[in-house]
Image: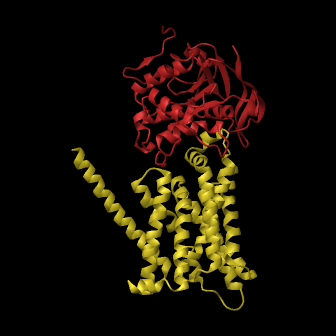
Chain colours: A red, B yellow
């Protein structure tokens, strides 16, 4: 399968503080990678480097700069100012920024595509509503539309399962499986139990990155990766994620 | 009524009306951006920092508007740059610039020999003494602002809404931010002439807040704030003439009264809607 992104012995951080060291990662077409790790372990920094919003201190990302594929991005929902005066349809259209020159106009084809996506996600009736009137799950759907409207080769989701009900969570993973047939997906989550049953491979991020080419991971392996997360998840009944969950 | 028609025969009054309309247009557009992006405090900092420029220009015998423009734009770019490039807390930087600009202005005006200008006119403005040059400058600002927002409305809106996402889409985030913050500074400086340093922030926030009560669309918010701006400044202008009070204060007063009325109308609208639902 074709490589779409490669990180080579990458070091990243802010000013003097190094957060990530010696990161190697290859993302191929149709990959579905779950990123887990403790808070402050560098998950967000890794995403920022991949998204190109911060420059790596050392190492390289291939392909470089403008040759990099279009990346769809779903940020953490709590970073959004939901009082901002912008209607849903405009938020979805803003996903096409990378296709437009600064003076570029948005044509009827763009708007038709936005309508189509909003229909698929079941939010077309909210099209003209302001984002402040939406629930957490509806807002996540809007941001998912924005993330995929440009048909990216790679979709990155930063904790899409926070602030939403479990209903939406199920639907979200269904949508992601469908999208995965034509784009690679990287998902960051706190809910290790849930993502492990959906992704194809796992990366544990804590100061560095340990790649685990399977979605089955044990507590012992997590310890070996220096990734101290408990595999206990929060649910109706407290439970541990078992090694074999087929 | 006759008295009103008579008023329009005075040149100074026509100038004042022109200034009120141009101020409402430029502040309506820029103020909507300020309110939506929540940069009211930054705008306050730029306003007061520009007083340093007024003082310096006065000391050097230059046009105060020119000095204020230079100081305003430089402090705007400075605030934007410092908060992006360093880890100094933005609101602290604004606090420092705010006071420093005022101190500098007062010092320079004090040091200027001879006739000391009326500090009050800088602090509170006087729309009735606006001259032709002020009007041309305001007109130029309006034309430029309208052009920028006409051609760049979507990119401006998208970057203001979610800068991080815009950056991942390789949008010219930095260029737009610097352009917009400079426009904010210019709008503030040129409108100081109309309502003064202390009151200009109200022109940039009250009509916008009123408009925002009735619409969530950025575009409608712009048109709404222009309309409320013109209405409020006309009422203020007439009251100022009638009771011979400082125009800046009467304009802000009518803005606040409009705000209270709008709030009541909004509350009534909400309760009527609730009744219809029940």
Q: Is residue A149 above or below residue B199?
A: above
Comparing B187 with A194, the one in front is: B187
What residue do we see at 63% from left, 86% from top? B117
Q: Is residue B60 above or below residue A195?
A: below
* B177 displayed left or right of A62: left
Q: Is residue A23 above or below residue B164?
A: above
Find residue A149 and report its horizontal and vertical position in percent: 56, 31
* A141 displayed left or right of B77: left
Q: Tell me, yes or no, if residue B6 can be seen here.
A: yes
- Which quadrant of the structure image shows residue A74? top right
Q: Is residue B261 above or below residue A195?
A: below
What residue do we see at 78% from left, 33% from top? A58
What residue do we see at 60% from left, 24% from top? A186
Comparing A120 with B73, the one in front is: A120
What residue do we see at 49% from left, 68% from top? B202
Find residue B95 and report its horizontal and vertical position in percent: 60, 64
Find residue B271 and report its horizontal and vertical position in percent: 26, 53
Find residue A230 and report its horizontal and vertical position in percent: 51, 22
Image quadrant in which the N terminus of chain B is located: bottom left
- Which quadrant of the structure image shows residue B56? bottom right
Q: Tell me, yes or no, if residue A231 can be seen here.
A: no
Image quadrant in which the C terminus of chain B is located: top left
Comparing B22 with A14, the one in front is: B22
Comparing B271 with B46, the one in front is: B271
Q: How many marks?
A: 0
Residue found at the far bottom of this picture: B114
């Amino acid at each position: 399968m074709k490589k779409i992104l490669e990180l080579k012995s990458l070091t990243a951080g802010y000013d003097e503080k190094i957060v990530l060291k010696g990161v190697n990662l290859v993302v191929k077409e149709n990959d579905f990678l779950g990123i887990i790790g403790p808070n402050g372990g560098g998950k967000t920094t890794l995403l920022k480097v991949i998204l190109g919003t911060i420059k790596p201190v050392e190492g390289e990302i291939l392909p470089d700069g403008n040759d990099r594929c279009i990346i769809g991005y779903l940020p953490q929902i709590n970073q959004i100012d939901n009082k901002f005066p912008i209607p849903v349809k405009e938020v979805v259209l803003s996903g096409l920024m990378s296709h437009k020159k600064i003076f570029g106009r948005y044509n009827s084809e763009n708007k038709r595509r936005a309508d189509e996506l909003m229909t698929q996600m079941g939010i077309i009736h909210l099209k003209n509503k302001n984002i402040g009137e939406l629930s957490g799950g509806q807002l996540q759907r809007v941001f998912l539309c924005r993330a995929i409207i440009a048909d990216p080769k790679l979709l990155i989701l930063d904790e899409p399962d926070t602030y939403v009900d479990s209903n939406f969570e199920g639907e979200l993973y269904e949508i992601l499986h469908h999208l995965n047939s034509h784009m690679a997906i990287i998902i960051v989550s706190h809910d290790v139990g849930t993502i492990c049953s959906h992704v194809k491979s796992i990366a544990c991020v804590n100061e560095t990155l340990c790649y685990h080419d399977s979605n089955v991971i044990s507590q012992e392996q997590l310890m070996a990766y220096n990734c101290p997360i408990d595999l206990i998840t929060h649910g109706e009944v407290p439970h541990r994620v078992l090694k074999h969950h087929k | 009524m006759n008295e009103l028609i008579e008023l329009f025969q005075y040149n100074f009054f026509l100038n004042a009306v022109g200034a009120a309309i141009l101020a409402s247009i430029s502040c309506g557009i820029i103020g909507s951006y300020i309110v939506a992006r929540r940069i009211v405090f930054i705008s306050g900092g730029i306003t007061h920092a520009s007083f340093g420029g007024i003082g310096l220009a006065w000391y050097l015998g230059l046009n105060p508007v020119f000095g204020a423009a230079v100081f305003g734009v430089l402090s705007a770019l400075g605030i934007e740059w410092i908060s992006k490039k360093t880890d100094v807390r933005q609101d602290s930087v604004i606090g420092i610039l705010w006071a420093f600009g005022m101190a500098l202005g007062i010092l320079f005006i004090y040091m200027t020999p001879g006739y000391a200008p009326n500090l009050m006119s800088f602090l509170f403005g006087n729309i009735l003494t606006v001259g032709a040059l002020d009007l041309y400058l305001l007109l130029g600002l309006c034309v430029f602002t309208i052009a920028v927002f006409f051609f760049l409305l979507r990119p401006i809106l998208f970057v203001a809404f979610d800068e991080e996402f815009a950056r991942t889409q390789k949008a010219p985030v930095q260029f737009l931010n610097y352009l917009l913050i400079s426009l904010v500074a210019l709008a503030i400086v040129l409108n100081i002439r109309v309502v003064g340093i202390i009151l200009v922030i109200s022109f940039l926030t009250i009509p916008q807040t009123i408009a925002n009560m009735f619409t969530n669309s950025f575009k409608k918010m712009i048109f709404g704030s222009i309309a409320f701006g013109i209405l409020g400044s006309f009422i203020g202008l007439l009251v100022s003439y009638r009771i011979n009070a400082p125009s800046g204060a009467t304009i802000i007063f009518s803005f606040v009264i409009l705000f209270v009325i709008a709030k009541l109308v909004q509350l009534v609208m909400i309760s009527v809607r609730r009744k219809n639902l029940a």
